[in-house]
Image (cartoon, rainbow, N blue to C red):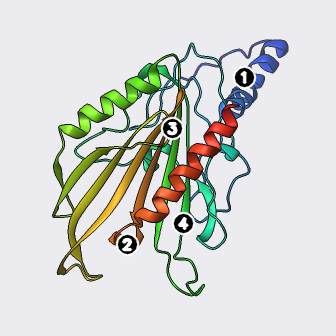
Amino acid sequence: MSRSVPLPPARTRRSLALLPLLGTIALAAACTTTGEPPDSAPATTAPTTTSASAPPTGAPSPSASSPRVTIPTSAFVELPAELRKSPRRTTPVEEALPTLCGNEFGTGGRQVTASAAMTVTYQTAGEPASNVPQGMIHQTIFTFDGAGASAYLDRLRTAVQACPSYEQAGNRVTVKSEVLTGVGGEGLLLTRTWPETSLNGERTGGTASSQIAVARVDSTVTVFNDQGWEGTSGNPAILDRVLRDGVRAIDAWQR
């Protein structure tokens, strides 16, 4: 036998009706803007990671007790017109960072105060506009508390030394590291080399290579990850130019 349940007073019913609306407002206020998809237009400001309780996988964790830091778009490098295939765009940090044997570049720890990444797509100067790009360079910027930037470089050197080679897409990739001088306070240059393959995946008998450059500018570290188009070799000359221009942009931002 059914039993009727008395309704709460009108005032109580009005309060209960407001709860879903208040929950919706709270959720909307808590949302943050996500990174843009690869084909979207470039953003006017770069994404900034600050005091997040659950950072993206592979990215260094920002410190909850650190002062708020904003990384502006002007801190990132932009290619000159003759090398620019498409405008720079925002990129999720975990996608911009390279991986070798493991999570070597995502070891910033709790001293990270902010992180952001952008990607530039480059071409060889003078090439027709109809040609495909030559490659992409993902730039990631981290800011740190205290001596966190130097500690990050120390951990990265140790991790790279433990990874002389690794497997990728069925190919053995060798890693060579060397000290990067004349750029920032300290730096590291990595060269990855693997058997070259054609577009249909057949080995050509040659080798392909790309580079990763890391530089510290005071309490900031920037990582440049050069990737040739569709698995081809990167361009060391363009990476070197982008690295130096990028360090100057960070230095100008910090002044």
Q: Position of residue 180 (x, y in %)?
A: 38, 44
Q: In this figure, which residue is indicated by the disc labeled 2?
A: 230
Identify the residue at image location x=46%, y=37%: 56
Q: Where is residue 235 in the image (x, y as percent from the top left)?
A: 42, 67
Cα gap from disc 3 to disc 2, whole angstroms? 31 Å
- 250 up-or-down from 25: above or below: below
Cα gap from disc 4 to disc 3, whole angstroms? 24 Å
Mark 3 element type: loop
- 138 up-or-down from 181: above or below: below
Q: Which of marks 1 and 2 is in front?
A: 2
Q: In which quarter of the image is the C terminus?
A: top right
Camera-side residue: 247 or 103? 247
Badge 3: how crowded within 10 Å, few (<14), some, or many (20+)?
A: many
Q: In this figure, which residue is indicated by the disc labeled 4?
A: 121
Camera-side residue: 97 or 254? 254
Amino acid type, callout 1: Leu
Identify the residue at image location x=35%, y=47%: 189
Total numbered labels placed on residues in the image: 4
Q: Which of marks 4 and 3 is in front?
A: 3
Q: Earlier in the sequence, mark 4 or mark 1?
A: 1
Q: Nearer the viewer, mark 3 or mark 2?
A: 3
Q: Which of marks 4 and 1 is in front?
A: 4
Q: Where is residue 244 in the image (x, y as percent from the top left)?
A: 54, 50
CB atoms at circles 3 and 1 under 8 Å apart?
A: no
Q: In this figure, which residue is indicated by the disc labeled 1?
A: 19
Q: Which of marks 1 and 2 is nearer the N terminus?
A: 1
Q: Where is residue 133 in the image (x, y as percent from the top left)?
A: 50, 75
Amino acid type, callout 4: Thr
